[in-house]
Image (tube, rainbow, N blue to C red):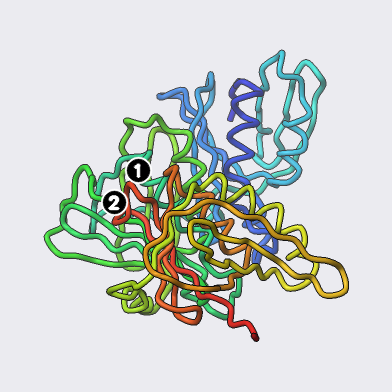
Amino acid sequence: MRLTCSQTDLNSALQLVSRAVATKPTHPILANVLLTADQSTNRLSLTGFDLSLGIQTFLTASVEISGAITLPAKLLVEIISKLSNESPVVFETDENGEMVSLKSKSGTYQVRGMPSDDFPDLPLVESGNSIKLNASEFVNSLRSTLFASSNDEAKQLLTGVNLNFKSSSFEAAATDGHRLAVFNLSNILDNDNEENFSLTLPARSLREVERFIGSCKDAESISFFSDQGQVVFMASDQIVTTRTLDGIYPNYLQLIPDEFSNELQFNRLDFIASLERVAVLADQHNNIIKLTNNNNTVLISADAQDVGSGSESIPVKTNGNIDQIAFNVRYLLEGLKVISSEEVILKCNSPTTPAIFSPVSEELKFIYLVMPVQIRS
């Protein structure tokens, strides 16, 4: 294999695919990146795959001799990232195809690789469900739900995001048992499926999908394929594959009350600013803040035992009457920061039942449910 490519492009590609390289590989080759050079297309592909998450990307290169080899990801990233971006990088393997020479303006490096034949094939879905998604809308759905997934591996399914596809729309949902984020998207571009289907994907994988889709143009569509527990996302010159999480996702819709007796409407940015200031005290104790309704204002307060207390008031529009309700301030801030609407509405029935936050302009598009914290009188 012999090729020449841009240091900048190669470094960016390596940073991307190395996210799918196993940190504690069960086999030595899983710590490597697969490089495949194609003379007919003058392209170099890089692949990282830890048997659960796979990322493949392509870049333009001047390929003199086609070939493939795997190289240690961590070592390769550190070398390429430190080379000068003012000159191209030349790759060349020896006669045995085991040693790679990297030449640049900065110098020459030798890196020992492993045969590409030993690298596991990246799963590709050739049948099953096929959908085209709007890039910007789909990434919005991920940003609006990923934060609410659980970090506790013991909760298995709750460490992912549930995607529920219908004929012309889909719903994304994530919960950690304390809060629930639900995002509805109606403008799927093309759905070949007559039947509805649902799957749950690991949050870690979807964060990588979010990153690569975020780099796509807003008008660009994302191809989505799923079959037999494997999912593939494709866009421009990148492919992300991931396994689904086994099991039936909880029926989260039954958690959302049908009616509410109390409503508070407020400016989102004002509310966030006040919460962040009061959170300085809440963080000192238990992260709990209290919301106390008083006519057309809401008092936001926190009491850190043996440290101090703080409170702020913001104007609100009210419908109903709820005296006081308490929340984990971090849950509120994370949910409010993914809402884009200027005005947000809080709906609740009592200080001990689920509360709903949603944008006033698009209440049906995004719902954020938070369980209040019970406080002693």
Outermost residue, front direction?
A: 295
In the displayed structure image, the side of residue 300 where residue 42 appears, left or right:
left
Residue 64 in the image, given as x and y percentages of width and height: 54, 20
- Whether tag 1 and tag 2 are in contact, CB under 8 A, the answer is yes
Residue 58 to residue 276: above or below: above
Residue 310 to residue 224: above or below: below
Quarter of the image holding residue 11? top right
Residue at numbered disc 1? 137
Q: CA distance from mark 1 to mark 2?
A: 7 Å
N-terminal-most mark, 1 or 2:
1
Residue at numbered disc 2? 185
**Residue displayed at 41% across by 24% down:** 41
**Number of other residues with Cα within 10 Å of mark 2, as a class: few under 14, some 14 to 19, many 20 or more:** many
Residue 315 in the image, given as x and y percentages of width and height: 52, 51
Residue 159 to residue 97: above or below: below
Amino acid type of the residue that numbered disc 2 sits on in the rendered structure: Leu
Amino acid type of the residue that numbered disc 1 sits on in the rendered structure: Glu
**Residue displayed at 38% across by 68% down:** 320
| Disc 2, SS | strand
Residue 180 in the image, given as x and y percentages of width and height: 45, 68
Any mark on residue 364, and which?
none
| Disc 1, SS | helix
Residue 232 in the image, given as x and y percentages of width and height: 37, 52
Outermost residue, right direction?
A: 306
**Residue displayed at 32% across by 30% down:** 219
In the displayed structure image, the side of residue 99 where residue 58 appears, left or right:
left
Outermost residue, bottom direction?
A: 376
Front in this rendered view, residue 345 or 158: 345
